[in-house]
Amino acid sequence: MPIQPLNLKKSGLDHKEWQLLKKLNTPAKIQDFLNSLKFNFEKEGETNSSVSLTLKRRKAQCFEGALLAAAALWVQGQKPLLLDLKTIRPDFDHVVALFREGKCWGAISKTNHAVLRYREPVYKSAGELAMSYFHEYFLPSGKKTLRNFSKPFDLSKHGTAWLTTKENLTSLAYKLDHSPHTRILSSKQIKDLRKADPIEIKAGEIREYL
């Protein structure tokens, strides 16, 4: 999905930050870089940091990781797209960055879990990709929780402040959360959902950072 590549002047990033993103010239390299960052547990409250702050702090939660990945993709000439995966409480929503290779979609993800991670560009649509997360999304009880996914959310339509601001990007997260979403299940399908198996639940307990 080509777009005019983001340039250094427009981005507002400093030269070092720009060069780093420039070097992340494949989705695999972007994912490897995100994996090298510590997970942001937001111990002092919700952060929703800009790309610049994330690079300085060297840690990210899923939204921050998705922003960084989207910025790197934009530098390479792809649209900076996010996908929001919405759950029922007490589970947490998840955000990934979308990319395309040819006609197929893939995703870059920052997560502390063994699942909900990178997706190879083998999916025919963003919706098909979103559904690949369905069976991995469950509570410790085994209850499956994914209910909605957003349409691709184009960050290039929301200015460039998310790249460099020192402010909390709560308003941008709100816009993503309230953007058009697709409902996955009917009431009957929700009622008939089978719980994850005990071995799946055990595997789901694996964390990258304690």
Image: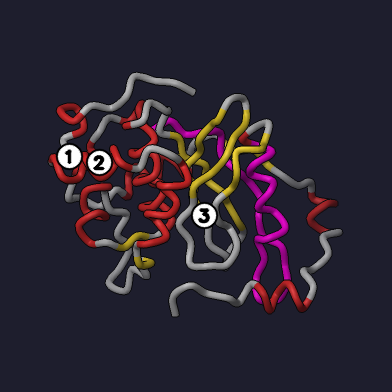
Residue 87, label in figure:
none
Question: To which quarter of the image does residue 13 belong?
Answer: top left
User: Vertically, is 66 above or below 135?
Assistant: above
Residue 142 colored magenta? Answer: yes
Q: Do the residues labelled 2 and 1 touch (CB within 8 Å)?
A: yes
Q: Which of marks 2 and 3 is in front?
A: 2
Kindly state the secondary structure of the residue where label 3 is placed: strand
Please give the residue where the numbered disc 1 appears in the rendered image. 13
**Mark 2: which amino acid?**
Leu
User: From mark 2 to mark 3, how far is it between C-alphas?
Assistant: 20 Å
Q: In this view, does 11 lie above or below 183?
A: above
- On the image, the x and y values in percent for residue 10 come to 19, 27
| Segment tinted magenta in the rendering | 127-155
Q: Find disc 3 in the rendering and name its residue.
A: 94
Q: Which residue is drawn at 44% across and 75% down?
A: 209
Which residue is disc 2 drawn over? 163
Residue at 32% over, 24% down: 5
Label 1 crowd (10 A; few <14 / some 14-19 / many >=20): some
User: Relative to residue 97, is residue 36 depicted above or below?
Assistant: below
Which colouring convention does the figure follow? Answer: secondary structure
Query: Are there few (<14), some (14-19), or many (20+) residues within 10 Å of tag 2?
Result: many
Q: Position of residue 29 (x, y in %)?
A: 42, 47
Which comes sooner in the sequence, label 3 or label 1?
1
Image-based side of 192 in relation to 196, left or right: right
Q: Where is residue 4 in the image (x, y as percent from the top left)?
A: 34, 19
